[in-house]
Amino acid sequence: MASSPSEQTGLTPVKIVVAGGFGVGKTTFVGAISEIEPLRSEAIITEASAGIDDLFEDGTKTETTVAMDFGRISLKHQLVLYLFGTPGQDRFHFMWNELARGAIGAVVLVDTRRIEAGFAAIDFFEKRDTPFVVAINTFHGRKHHTIDEVRNALQIAPQIPIVYCDARVRVDVQRVLVTLVEHALNLATTGASVH
């Protein structure tokens, strides 16, 4: 009987989903940490999206993910994380089920300037009983709200970790991923519920 690739290499593969609303920094988050060139499925935003997608009025976002982002990062103890970034637009939420299948957990990335964009991802992972952490993308290190204010606004249970991060900074992204893995392992060993 042939051994699996993970048995041959001694690596433990772990799938993680990075979700959140449109334009919160998911593609940037995956790209900041991936040790391989991330696979991206971005398309140019056109005027045809007006009225369908929640476009930025200032025109700073010119591309958007239409399928997924994919990256990989190796951590200590022979752990390899495979990151799957979801598209943020409501019309692509049907893809989340496939992207989340087999994941040990998820990062819900939020932008406090548009906090309501995080509700769909939080609801999705709560309904699936998937462990998740909330990462507040600080955009240049600016913390506009406290963690308690974000927890209250998103109606997040006290046991769900919330952390600040700048999605462009590798060490911040690594800290978020370690927090998620530790949270998922804790839930698995204690048998506790996600929410």
Image (cartoon, grey):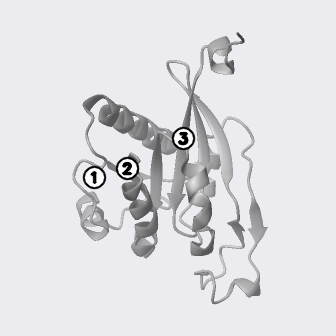
Q: Which comes before the other along the chain, label 3 or label 1?
A: 3
Query: Disc 3 residue type?
Result: Gly
Vertical placement of residue 81 versus 95, above or below: above
Say what secondary structure mark 3 lies in: loop
Residue that badge 3 annotates: 102
Residue that badge 2 annotates: 129
Say what secondary structure mark 2 lies in: loop
Vertical placement of residue 2 versus 96, above or below: above
144 sits left or right of 69 in the view: left
Whole-percent x, y for residue 41 in the image: 75, 58
State the residue at coordinates (52%, 68%): 21
Vertical placement of residue 107 versus 14, above or below: below
Q: Quadrant of residue 89?
A: bottom right
User: Crowding at label 1, few (<14), some or many (≥20) Cα neighbours within 10 Å?
Assistant: some
Cβ–Cβ below 8 Å for labels 1 and 2? yes
User: Crowding at label 3, few (<14), some or many (≥20) Cα neighbours within 10 Å?
Assistant: few
127 sits left or right of 49 in the view: left
